Every structure is written in structure tokens, then in C-alpha cells.
Amino acid sequence: MDNPYQTLNDLITDSLFPELDSRLRRGEHIDARHTHLFNMLRNGVNILGDHYHRYGVELTHAPEDFYYLRPSTGGKHLIRSRKLDALTMITGQVLALYHLDPEQLEGSGWISIDAIYERLRLLLDETYLCKLLERRKLDTQADREKGLEILRRSIRQLTRLGMVRLEGNQSHRVQTQSPLMRFIEPVRSAPCSAAALEKLVQQGYISLDDDEDIQMPADIKAETTTSPASAEPPSQSKKKSQKELAEV
């Protein structure tokens, strides 16, 4: 089938372009779930890549076959960006661990919020997790409920970015999606990505891409050591190099 997009004008006059452009600028990740938008990107990736480059961002095609915008190195970035907080970053890493689990992918892929909460408790130093969840302690049912409420807020943010899918409006369960694989970038070359990523979570290391100084477009910039609650990870403050991380 011939490519329907030969020029930029062909793309921007398509009735779907406003929706596609808005989603990309919000930081959303577009994959095969978005059938028409995904096909539009696939057919027009070179033209759109040049178009967005003028705004100081790159249209990126990930190995897992999804698209998103990220700022170019150097120059002005004309598309607004802001940071994700530390809890949302770490929650994304934990959900990426689930997505890397073959048993998880063979099943329905749905994970309860309670299970995510318990895995965070298992992996993180309790003092650090308390700060992330804005609690002084986590040993009462009331503390747990408040912590779960904060966790759901982070999961809703990941949902808006297309990284997970929520079941209904209650936010009791989530289904992992391929864009979560952005969280494995620091350890993608490791012999066992899952084991290396789990160690990063335990150390409190937070990153999305190889170059931590690059801003992430529309809600996707990572904070490396602190959250709005000033939560500091229990590990050493000096960050490891990407080579060291890949060898974890």
C-alpha cells in the first residue's frame, strides 16, 4: 500500500493529526493500542521527525515499537516539560519489573495496587518509602490506606503517559504496557535487565534514559535523588556511571 503521507501538509491536514500532536506533546507514548495514530506515526515518522526537530525535540521510536517525544541535546526546547516525582519514577521501575516477568505477561497482566504497594515495601528502605508516601510510619491500617492513596496518584500519572492501563475508575488494578520499558534504559545492556533494575530500585537510583541531563517532554523528566517530599534514598548520594549500572 502506498504511503498516504508524502509531505508535511499531508500529515497536518489529516483529521487525526490534532489528536496525535496533542498526545505527543503531553508526553504520551503511542503504541499499537492506538491503531490509527500508530499507523500515522509509522507512515509519517521521517516527516514528523523533521517537524518536531524544529521545536527542539526528537520523535523517538523505541525498540519495543512505541513512539514518544524527547528533547534534543542542546538548543531550545519549545515544548513544555516538567519533572516526575521520585515515587512515580520508582513505581514505574517496579511496574517495569512486573512487565519483564514472563509469567506476568503470559497471564492477564493485571496487577493489584496492593501487590505494587507490598513490592515497594519489600524493595525499599522503610524510612525512604515513608518519605515517598508522605507518612511518618506504615504500621497501621490508616497509614496503609493513606499510602495507597498517594501511590494511586502516581499510577494515574503513569496511566496518562500511556505506560499502564487502569481497570475502570477505581484504580484497584493496573495492566502493564510496553512503554514501561523506558525505565530499563540504564540497564538495557545488562546480562539480566530485571535483576539489574531491581538493584537500582533498592539503591534509590532514578533515571529514564542514558543522559539524565536531558529533559523529558511533557511530564516525563526524572528526578535523580530527591522528591518533593525531600525523600533521599538510603544508598550513597554519588550516582554510578551507566557502565557500572549495566554491570550490576
Image (cartoon, helix red, strand yellow):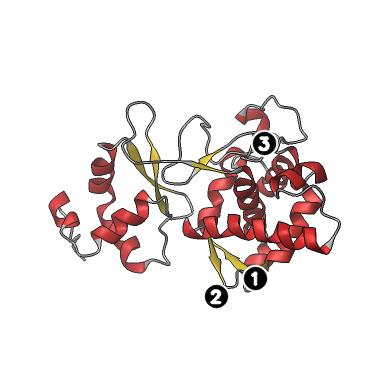
Label located before the other in sequence (2 or 3): 2
Single out the mark in the foreground, 2 or 3.
3
The residue shown at (20%, 60%) is 3
Q: Which residue is mark 1?
A: 172
- Residue 47: image location, x then y, percent: 22, 47
Left or right of 27, for residue 137? right
User: As shown in the figure, which amino acid type bears the numbered disc 1?
Assistant: His
Q: Position of residue 231 (x, y in %)?
A: 70, 38
Residue at x-position 55% and y-position 73%: 169
Q: Residue at x 64, y 52 (%)?
A: 91
Name the residue at 66% across, 61% down.
149
Q: Is residue 7 visible?
A: no
Residue marked by disc 3: 230
Helix, strand or loop at mark 3: loop
Q: In this rendering, which labeled residue sits more in front, label 1 or label 3?
A: 3
Q: Which image quadrant: the N terminus?
A: bottom left
Question: Residue 221 appears at what percent x and percent y?
Answer: 50, 40
Q: Vertically, is 208 above or below 159?
A: above
Residue 105 percent coordinates (x, y)? 62, 66
Element under label 1? loop
Asked whether 86 or 96 is in front, the reply is 86
Q: Is residue 140 above or below residue 61?
A: below
Mark 1 Cα-neighbour bin, 10 Å: few <14, some 14–19, many ≥20: some
Mark 1 touches mark 3? (CB < 8 Å):
no
From what the image shows, is residue 22 above or below residue 222? below
Residue type, numbered disc 3: Ser
The residue that label 2 is drawn on is: 168
